[in-house]
Amino acid sequence: MKSWYKDSIVYQIYPRSFQDSAETAFPNDGIGDIPGIISRLDEIKELGVNVIWLSPVYKSPDADNGYDISDYYDISPKFGTMADMERLFAEAKKRDIRIIMDLVINHTSDEHEWFQKSRDPASPYRNYYIWQPGKNSRKQPPNNWTGFFTGDTWEYDEKSGEYYLHLFDKKQPDLNFKNPKVIEEVKNILRFWLDKGAAGFRCDVINIIYKTSLEDGKKSMAVRGLEHYKSQEGAHEVLRELRRDVLDKYDCFTVGETVFVDLEDAKLLCNEDRKELNMLFFFDHLEVDRRIAQFIPKKFHAHKLLKVTTKWQQGLDWNAVYFENHDQPRIVSHYGAAESERALPGEMWKRSAKMLALFEMTLRGTLFIYQGQEIGMTNFDFKSMDELNDVVSFGINKLMKKLFIPGFLRWKWIKASSRDNARTPMQWNNDENAGFSRGKPWLGVNNNYRHINYESQKKDPDSILNFYKKLIALRKESKCLVYGEFLPLYADSRLIIYRRKLNNEIYTIALNFSSNEIKLPGKYLPCFSGDRVISASGRKQESRMLPWDGVLIKTANY
Ligand code: TEU
C-alpha cells in the first residue's frame, strides 16, 4: 500500500451546499450539484488540495440529506447523472485530484429496494436487516435502546408484523452484518466505485455496524444499548474482510468515522498491521466544551484541548486531522472569536480563524478541510426553528421539551450546536445568494456573505484564504509538520504551546485562545528565538501574544 494519503490535503464537499448550476434536471433549484463542483475544481486545486471527500451524492429520499441511500449505484437527479459523476472523476484527475466517496453502510434508506423486499418475512432479503418481534405480544419494542437522533430505535411495520432496528432516523433501517450476503453487497459497492475511479472511502459510523446482541442496554444518559454494538469484534472482522478481498487490491485509503470511540478502540481499528482502516475521525477534540449530550455547553479551557490533542496525536500511529465537517458547528464560532453573529465579522474573527488554521495545519496526520472553513465561515444567525432543516435539531428540541427545558435555553443550545450551521451555502462572492445559486437556496445563506466570501479573500493577500494557502504550501515543504513527533510544552486556560520535531527540524507553535494579550511564560522564551515563520496577526511580538494570535517558529536547536 502506497502512503500518498499521508501527506494529502483532503477537502470535504457537502454537495448540496457547495455550488448550484443550471446543468442538471433541476437547474438553479437552490441545491448544489456535480456540474457545480466541476466548475469549482480550479479553486480547490489552487488551495493546494489533492483529495476531495464527497459527502453522499447517491439516490436518496433525503431524510438525512443523502445519508439515507436508496441506490448505491446511482446518482441523485438533484446532483446530476452518472455521466456527470464520471466527468467529475475525469476533470479532477486532470488536476491531480483524487476523490473519495462517502460509504454509508450501517443503514440504507427505508426506500431501498432491499428494505422494501425485506418487509416480506418470506423474502430472501428479510435477513438483510434486523427484524424482531415485539415484547409482550408485540405491544413493546424488542429492547430498551435509544437512538443517535434522540428518538426510538425500533419501528413497527404492519406489513411484517415485526419491528426493525434503526439507530438513526426511522427512515434509516440498520443493515444486518451478521449476514454474509450483506458483506458481499458492500464489496460489490466498493468495487463499483473503485472501478469508476474512486481513491477510497470515508466510512460513516463504521465502528457500530455489527450488533453482537440485541439485549437491553445498561442505564445511560446518552445512547442506551451502545455496549452491544460499539467496536465489536464482528465489526473488526468485517473491516478486515473488506480490506483483504477488495480494498487492498486498489490504490486507495479509508478513513472511518467512529462514534463514541476511545483510544483503545481506535488503536485496534487503525493499527497498520491489523489491516482494518487507514485512519479514523474521533470527536474528543471538538467536545472539550460540551457535556455528554453534545449540545449542552461547558466552559472552554485551552489546557483541556491540548491534553486531548496530545492523547490522540501521540496515541495513534496515524491521525485524521479535522476541525470541521457537515455535522459540526463552524470552528471559528466554536473555539474562535466570531462575535455575536449580528455584528460584522471583525479583526478578531479573522485572526482567530487564522490561529485555528495554524493549529490544525501543524498537527501530525492527514489533513481534512471542510468547505468554507478556508474562508472562516461562521455559524448562521438562525432566528427560529422554522429556518432549520436538520432532523437532529428537531429531535433534540423534542427531547428537551420532554425534559421541561425552557424554550429560551433550548433555542440557545440548538442554535449553537445545530448541524445546519455547517450546511449553509458556500459563500463564493458578493452576488445574490453569495454566488451559490440563482434560485432560492435550500438552506439560508449566511447574512455575512458580503464580508466573508471567497472572491474578496482571493484578492486580499492578508485574508484567511491566503493564510490557508500559505500553511498548506508550508506543510508540503516540511516533512516535520506532517510526520514529526507532537510534543506538548505548556498550557493554561488560554494558552497552548507545543512543538513538532523530526530529526533536527523543530517547530514551536503557540496559540492564544483568548481576547487578552498574554505574556509568554519566561521559561519558554528561548523556544521563540528562532525564525518566525508565520503568525496569525502578522506582527512580531517577542515575548507577548496578541489576542487570538498564533505563531509558528522554526526553532534553532534548544
Ligand atoms: O454521523 C454520525 C453521528 O452520529 C454524529 O456525527 C451525529 O451527526 C451527531 O451525533 C448528531 O447528534 C454520520 C454522518 O456524518 C451524519 O451526517 C449522519 O446523519 C449520520 O452518520 C447517519 O448516517
Image (cartoon, rainbow, N blue to C red):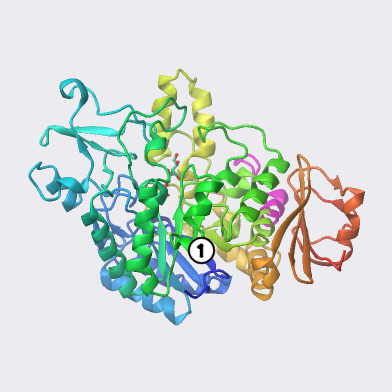
Q: Quadrant of the C terminus?
A: bottom right
Furthest residue toward top:
404
From the viewer's perspective, is residue 529 above or below residue 163?
A: below
Tell me what residue is drawn at x 19 percent, y 20 percent: 136
Q: Position of residue 312 (x, y in %)?
A: 61, 51
The reply to whether residue 89 is in sight is yes
Other-residue count near label 1 (Cα within 10 Å), few / some / many at <14 / 14–19 / ≥20: some
Specify whether 437 is left or right of 26: right
Q: Position of residue 512 (x, y in %)?
A: 76, 48
Tell me what residue is drawn at x 57 percent, y 58 percent: 319
- Magenta residues span 337-355
Would residue 546 be counted in the magenta stretch? no
Q: Splitting the image into 4 quarters, where does residue 305 fall?
A: top right
Q: Secondary structure at mark 1?
A: helix
The reply to whether residue 441 is in sight is no
Tell me what residue is drawn at x 43 percent, y 79 percent: 93
> Which residue does the numbered mark 1 point to in the structure image?
272
Q: Hey, what amino acid is under mark 1?
A: Glu
Ligand 1 picture quarter: top left
Q: Nearer the viewer, residue 493 or 448?
A: 493
